[in-house]
Image (cartoon, rainbow, N blue to C red):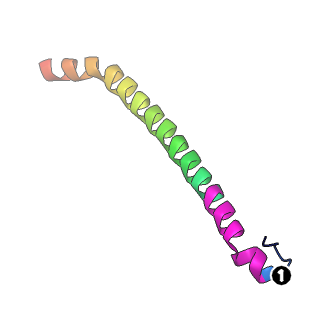
Amino acid sequence: MRLATLHLETARYGDAYRAARLALLRQQVVRHIKRTDVSAQKVEQALATLAEANAPMDRLARHQ
C-alpha cells in the first residue's frame, strides 16, 4: 500500500492533485458553457422581440 506523503511537491504535482484539479476545471468549463448558452438564448430572444417590434415600421417605410 502506498501512503501519501506531506511533501509539497507530492501534494502539488501528484496524481491525486492532478485528478482533482482536472475535475474542478472540467466542472468550471461545463458551468461556463451552460452560462454562455443561457446568455446566448437571452440575446436571441431579445433580437427576435426587437425584430418583431420593428416589423411594422419596416412595412410602413416601404409604402411611403
Q: Position of residue 41 (x, y in %)?
A: 44, 33
Instruction: Pinpoint residue 38: horizontal percent, then vertical percent.
Output: 50, 36
Is 47 drawn above or below residue 63 in the view shown? below
Q: Visible in this render: residue 64?
A: no
Q: Does the magenta stretch include residue 55?
A: no
- Is residue 8 visible in the rendered image? The answer is yes
Of residues 3 and 27, the one nearer the viewer is 3
Q: In this view, does 36 lie to the left or right of 63?
A: right
Q: Quadrant of the image for the N terminus?
A: bottom right
Query: 31 or 21: which is nearer to us?
Result: 21
The amino acid type, in three-letter code, at marker 1 is His
Percent position (x, y) of residue 53?
Answer: 35, 21
**Height in image: 40 above or below 60?**
below
Q: Residues within 10 Å of mark 1 (few under 14, many from 20)?
A: few
For the record, the magenta segment spans 9-23
Residue placed at 58% from the left, 46% from the top? 31
Single out the residue that lies furthest toward the front: 1
Q: In this view, does 36 lie to the left or right of 11?
A: left
Classify the position of the C terminus by image quarter: top left
**Residue positioned 33% across, 21% down in the render:** 52
The residue pinned by badge 1 equals 7
For image coordinates 84% across by 77% down, the residue present is: 5
